[in-house]
Amino acid sequence: MADARQTIEAGKAVLGIEFGSTRIKAVLIDEDNKPIAQGSHEWENQLVDGLWTYSIEAIWFGLQDCYADLRKNVQQQYDIEIETLAAIGISAMMHGYMPFNKEDKILVPFRTWRNTNTAKAAKALSDLFVYNIPLRWSISHLYEAILDNEEHVKDITFQTTLAGYIHWQLTGEKVLGVGDASGMMPVDPNTKTYDATMVEKFDKLIEPFQFGWKLLDIFPKVLVAGQQAGFLTPEGAGKLDISGHLKPGIPFCPPEGDAGTGMAATNAVKQRTGNVSAGTSSFSMIVLEKELSKPYEPIDIVTTPDGSLVAMVHCNNCTSDINAWVGLFREYQEMLGVPVDMNELYGKLFNKALEGAADCGGLLAYNYVSGEPVTGLAEGRPLFVRSANDKFNLANFMRAQLYGAIGVLKIGNDILLKEEQVKVDRITGHGGYFKTPGVGQRMLAAALNSPISVMETAGEGGAWGIALLASFVVNNGDGMTLDEWLDARVFAGDKGVEIAPTAEDVAGFNAYIENYKKGLAIEQSAVDNKK
């Protein structure tokens, strides 16, 4: 505690702040890159005029309240005030649409990644670029606004992401980390900026509209991990710390997206490594050695914070339906008058799944609380399916639920691992799916036919990841690459606890997923025939 106090007093602590979809989190780290204080703020998106948004007021109140909570934490733990810092990093959920005019006023409410009103634009751009352009990407939002003849488009002078906006307001710099930029539009791994051929195609596409701007006029400049991205201005210091204690002049790393911070937090930025985040939703990110042979609709291509290509499979659903079933078991236990410890209940049910048949005895579970683009479902209906001859018991039931939570993830990754022959040396898992030791790991190892590691530090999350990227800017005197620095200075060879797949589990999951694919017609019918 004394060391942490001295670090903060000397201005050597590093701050990372990440805006998640339900929580804004701040993490302060020491010179060994270990967390020494935290702050947070809960928030929720709003549906306004049919589009998901967070207001500018909510963004700033959330940032200020989160930082104030961090200050309070520091005062309580160390009896000291934060006056200055070694570096700061800002991260946020990727994609979306934030256009500004020449007076620096936002032209329409921030449109988040959740919005799916961009189907026409995404398809047209995917065809034009011969590249998968997802609905949530910023270029899709921009082109959809053009196709919809929105009046504000002609007045755009700057368009950025949430992380880019906050960084700009704190530093005055209109820049973006390459990972976040790769969720605005495709990035060339050689130049580590927007793909020049695609930029030229887009500019030609919109020429008839005569807006008076070209794409590079309004998009932020792209930076890579390790580059300095400006300094906290006096105005920025006042916006971040309304108490007035924080001094300007603190250096910033490039603002990044939540995908990039997840890679940093799991030491998965090196080629042939990957990570899987599995909670309410799930996604996998595998760092590629080379470009894929062709575009695939279920696979988004983004980059690491230092510009390597990453294949991302994003699934809308993961653990929500498991949580609902565990809630049912809790109700039963309460009805019997038995005290409920939810951690114990989850642990016993998850471990029971290990006793189930490798193919779940024929049982099927669809966890589709919402639609699932990878399998072509516009809406979701959670389903549990069995035939009269299937082996229906608790162990098989729980195993089917755990398999079902990552079934879509397997379908997307089978494209990479089987069709594209992508090579992966290590995959790290993090999120609630892995909370019960060994169980989720074993299921994912079977699904991907790959060893899965889980680290204790993975739970620190994206705010820690962006703090690491900020530390990398000011604490890399040896000139190491990002993956070298993470190995040597943060993880020091710690690969976590690894579980390798067994032949029986792999064969069982493969049998399950074949039944699962056939049963998608049942899911579609449920969507078609239920209000």
Image (cartoon, helix red, strand yellow):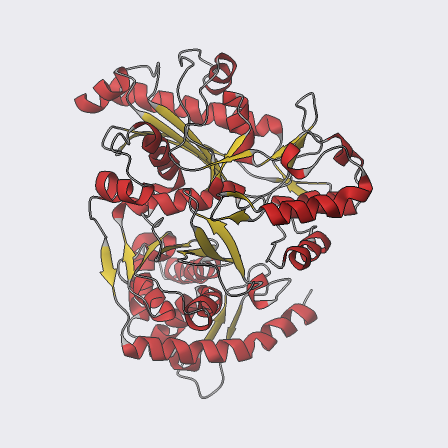
Q: Please say if 236 is above or below 434.
A: above
Query: Is residue 1 visible to the viewer in this orientation of the structure?
Result: no
Q: Residue at x 35, y 30 (%)?
A: 473
Position of the N terminus, as image quadrant, is top left
Judged left or right of residue 285, residue 453 is left
In the image, residue 91 lies at what x, y percent? 46, 36
In the image, residue 20 lies at what x, y percent? 48, 40
User: For this rendering, which residue is in front, 141 or 216?
Assistant: 216
User: For this rendering, which residue is in front, 167 or 307?
Assistant: 307
| Residue found at the far bottom of this picture | 389
In the image, residue 70 lies at what x, y percent? 37, 25
Q: Residue at x 46, y 16 (%)?
A: 237
Judged left or right of residue 396, residue 321 is right
Q: Please say if 390 is above or below 307.
A: below
Position of the C terminus, as image quadrant, is bottom right
Q: Residue at x 25, y 45 (%)?
A: 487
Q: Quadrant of residue 213?
A: top right
